[in-house]
Each structure stands twice: as C-alpha cells, then as structure tokens.
Amino acid sequence: MSRTVLVIPETLMEVLHDRHALESDHTRDPGYVRVAHPAPPEQVTMFTVGVSRIGDRLEVLGHRLVETQEGDVERSMCFARLSAELQYESFLAAREAGGLVTVHHHPGKEFFSGQDRVALAAMNHHLFQIAPGAVHLALIFGSGGLVGEVWEGPESVRPLDEVRIVGLHGLHRWVPGNPIGEEICRLDTELHDRTLRVYGREVMAVATRLRFGIISVGGLGSAVCDVLKYFGTDFVLVDPDRVERHNAARLAGYRHGDEGVPKTEVLRRAILDYNPRARVLCVNTAFPSPESIEAAKDCDILLCGPDADWVRYEVNRFAARYLKPAFFLGTEVKLDPEGERVRRIVGQVRFFVPGGLCCVCQGLDGVIHHPKVMEFGRRTGYVKQDAAAATPSIVTVNVAVANLAVTRLLHYLSGRPAATNLYYDEMDLRWDNISGLYQRRPECPFCAPRGIAGLGDGEPAALLEGGGLDESVVA
C-alpha cells in the first residue's frame, strides 16, 4: 500500500514545540500536537531529511535542523517570508541529505492558503533545480493538528499519511485528520489478562502493531523470540545459519531432528505454534545483505544479538541512518588461560534510540574487523586461538539477557525513562546499570549532531567501502 510517512526524532519535535507553541493532545495520543491558543506570530522552521523507500511506501526521515540568523525570516501574525540566502543554503543542504521539510503554523485551522500555494510553487521551482531528486515536505500546524504534502518534483505531490515520533520517551504515531490517531486494536483480553494488568492496554496495543526485526536468531536471538512472541505479532528474522547438533542445548524452539534446518525456520515454527495469526518473514542471509537491509527498513524496532561485533557495528550504523530504536544484546563465557576453569559468565544489553547514545558510544570499542579479515588473520597466524577467548554461550545467561531486553522494550513502549546500558554477571547473580559510564563522542559519525542519523537511503550501507579484500585470498 502506498503511504507517505514522516519519521521525526523527538529532539527535532521539541524544537517545533518551542518555535510554534505546540501542545500535546493527550486525549488522542501524546504525539498528537496542535498550536496552542493564543497562537504566536507565524514562524518558519526547516530541517533536512533523508528518505527511505520501501516498495510503494515513502518514509521521510528527520536529519538536521537548518540554522537561521537574525533577519533570515520576516514574519508577522499573517505571513512569514524567507530570505533568498536562507532558501539557497537550505536547498544546498537538501541536495546533500536527500530532502527538506519546511514548517509553519496558522493561528486558526491548518490548511494550505492561497498565499501558501504561491510561496510553495516558487520554492519548489528553485529547490528542484538545485537539488533534483530531493523531496520537499511542507507542514502546516493549526488549532486542530497539522496537514502535510510531500513533493517529489514540481508536478509530483502526495499527501502526508502518517507521523511517527521516535525518541527517548517511546514511540508515538498518529494520522493527520484522524480524531483517534490510531486504528482500533482488538486484543484477546482473556489471553493477555495478566500482562494487561501490569503494562496496560496501550502498551500491548502498540506492541501488537509494531514489526520487530531480530538480527541473528542463534542462542541469544532465539531466546528473545521465545519471550517476544507473547507480545508481538509481526517479526522479521535474519540469520544465515542452519541448525547443528551443538546448537540444540541453547536454541529455543529446537526439536529433535532439526539439524540442517535454517534457524529462522525453527523460530518461525515456534512463533506460529503459539500464534498462528502472527506474521513472520525469514531472511536466510547475513546482515547487511541487500535482502536483510530491505527487510530491516520495514521494521519498527531492531533487536541484535549476533556473535560478531562487526555485525553489531553495521546494525548500529543502519539504526542511525533509518531512525530505528535498536537493542544490542551480548553474552560471553570466559575461561582461564588454560581453558580449564570458568572465569566469568556475563551479559550486556545496550539500547540505542535516535537522540541518545549509539552502541559505539556505549562501549562497542576497539577495531571492528570484517569476518574475511579475521579468517585471513587466523590462517596466516596473525590472530591466535586463545584458550581464554570467548566460548559459545549457555542457555541460562542467554535467557536472562533476553528477558531483560524484552522487559526494557516494554518499559520503552510505556514511555518510562530507564537505563540504556545494563550489565549482567551470572556468577555473582547481579545486574548493574552502567549507563552513566558513557558519554557521546563529539565527532561520533552515528549519533553526534553532525552524524548520519536520518540520512536513510542516501548513506552507503557497506562498512568496508569497495570490499578491499580479494575473495580469493580467503577462499
């Protein structure tokens, strides 16, 4: 179905709240906003955007505020006019990012006036000459909400169908012109009776509407699936591996004789055994393959639990580009140098949400090697096999970390502020909130103000640009 969606980070939405005197209408949805009364003089806000195309659906992704100087905007109660210099600079920025959003408000009803139409036609004429291929989303707030139109060329326009706000305080979604802001969600109150008592109908309704992308469904990812199936109904499972005998003791959903079956299919069966109406898409390739990228673009929240930090790095990059909240899960069993005694059994949950610290700023550090580089290093002796290195994890720590991640996810959907970095020590049976140990790196390419957040399809997906390593070297 062809839809046009604006995905805007909470941090940008806060700027719009301040500049346009917006207030939330909590009788509809915390994300639904309108101009307060009395309205201030008209104001204009612009920010650059990236785009994400998913079939016929177009997502416009908030990227970076266009800064204005004194004298750039002439305004009164009835109109706002941008200087030629500001327009030109914003068009250049739109060419780099992929598009532009212009926002203003009316003191009364939200609509495109005749004056708006004239100004919009003139702006589009110049914008698409300077930035061909860009999109232009025009938003007008009023006393009843907002209206929006997305231009993909001087003569190509489509209405804005949906607004999503993503940030540290949860996910909000509403439809312009829809008085309830959400489609009706029918829950089986008998089935979910205990959960509804704890989390309430609103959280369960949101969870059943979202599409969850689970990157790697081995021991840790399968444990996540096993818990999340009780809340969600729509899943994308990404993993290239097939079941081996040694997986059986920690792979949720395993049945005797599953050896050789793709792990995604094992988890798909387990989800459908619980809820035959669930939607499950299996992608049997490694992230970030083109198939996995396209599938993940259609997800609302990602949960990532692979063996390799290289994959976590790629998911972190993807989540920033497409404004996807993402959970990064890891577990580890460490042996002593002789490989005879367990030194520690630990796990960690990192949570990245647009506007917050990314996974790298939260401690995914060191050199992130491509698997081909690591394999080549082992074969040539540059990477040694160490008895104290990480060994395959065990089911107890996997289940503990998976449970914590899903609980943190539910807290996020309820809007509760909570930790973004949790560390689990299974030998001491303790959890520690270590969120305060980390700060954003000023020049982080992912989550810093000048980073790639919101660039969408305009930012290359591959970590190693051009490959760099001959396939024959590691064949």
Image (cartoon, grey):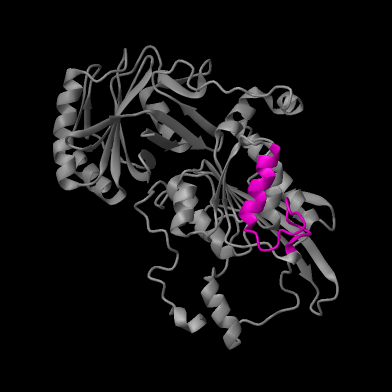
Q: State which quadrant residue 359 falls in.
A: bottom right
* Foreground of the two, 263 or 60: 263
Q: Residue at x 38, y 15 (%)?
A: 144
Viewed as shown, does residue 405 lie left or right of 99?
right
Q: Residue at x 53, y 15 (%)?
A: 27
The answer to whether residue 31 is above or below residue 251 is above
Q: Count the marks: how many?
A: 0
Furthest residue toward front:
257
The x, y position of residue 435, in whole percent, is: 65, 49
Residue 255 part of the magenta segment: yes
Residue 447 visible somewhere in the drawing: no
Q: State which quadrant residue 56 falls in.
A: top left
Residue 384 visible somewhere in the drawing: yes
- Give the magenta part as a residue range: 247-274
Viewed as shown, does residue 464 lie left or right of 316?
left
Residue 311 part of the magenta segment: no
The answer to whether residue 321 is above or below residue 16 is below
In the picture, which quadrant includes the N terminus?
top left
The x, y position of residue 333, in whole percent, is: 76, 65
Q: Residue at x 18, y 24 (%)?
A: 117
Q: Residue at x 70, y 62 (%)?
A: 259
The x, y position of residue 159, in whole percent, is: 30, 28
The x, y position of residue 134, in whole percent, is: 25, 44
The answer to whether residue 26 is above or below residue 459 is above
